[in-house]
Amino acid sequence: MTRLRFPVAILAGLAAAALLAGCAATGPDTAGARATGSGSDGASATGTTTAPAGSITVFAAASLQRTFTELGKRYEQTHPGTTITFSFAGSSDLATQIRNGAPADVFAAADETTMQGLVGSDVAAGAPRDFASNVLEIAVAPGNPEHIATLADLTRPGLQVVTCAAPVPCGAATGRVERIAGVDLRPVSEEQSVTDVLGKVSSGQADAGLVYATDVRGAGGKVDGVTFPAASRAVNTYPVTVLRRAANPALASAFTAYVRSDVGQRVLAAAGFGKP
């Protein structure tokens, strides 16, 4: 019988080829499959980021301007390649713009009623999530020169009082505290956002106005705040949602989650917002 014999060199070459083939089987595709798990910062075990990039536009209630601006900057700093643009106004105005087709990825409202209007019109991509709460205070000039102590004091003759218009969340809250306290306010002006009310008081155009507690805290001493019992029974809860027409739904979802995260809640609490 004839036996086939291979030179040692040939056997060594075949072994080397088999080794290379085995390495190829665990090349880039297999390694990539192993690195799909990611940590809480959106980075994989190999350090490759899996967090969504790009840009989004966030429509948010005027009372969120300071906190959301800060949260947007923090998010961009910790997630390179992202841009968060904001549009702040009265919640009802923003909701109207969204229904009329304004390009936005996220909507954060100052009350649940305004948000439910969008949910009912099938504009929201999913169920809104509550992330904060707020109550009203009476904003007065520094030092409270008119000596306003109660909600009823705002009915004094000659006192220039401003409030939000009824369709605006702070206006709806104003209506609730009036009914609770049995007070009928006669404002000289009804504004479309809480920041407009604050501006009238801080500039001296009004003696007092009903704004959120967070607005008084964020005014930097330009106004003082007067608390009143009825406010605690008219709490506004703030919901946020991704919109159905969002151009970047992945980043929109990531940012809304960031608002509800421990970091977001600390920023909101520092500004005076309560838990949802």
Image: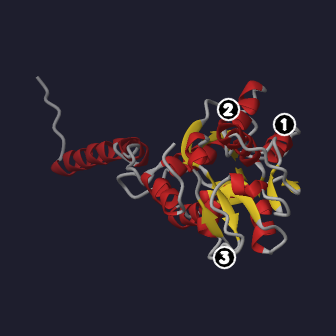
Residue type, label 2: Ala
Secondary structure beneath label 3? loop
User: What residue is disc 1 on?
Assistant: 99
User: What residue is disc 2 on?
Assistant: 125
Q: Are marks 3 and 2 in contact (CB under 8 Å)?
A: no
Horizontally, residue 183 falls left or right of residue 231, namely right
Earlier-in-chain disc, 1 versus 2: 1
Query: Along the line of sight, which residue is nearer the eye, 121 or 85?
Result: 121
Q: Quadrant of the N terminus?
A: top left
Between circles 3 and 2, the one closer to the viewer is 3
Residue type, label 1: Arg
Q: Which mark is residue 142?
A: 3
Name the outermost residue toward the front: 157
Query: Along the line of sight, which residue is nearer the eye, 252 or 115?
Result: 115
Earlier-in-chain disc, 3 versus 1: 1
Secondary structure beneath label 2? loop
Residue type, label 3: Pro
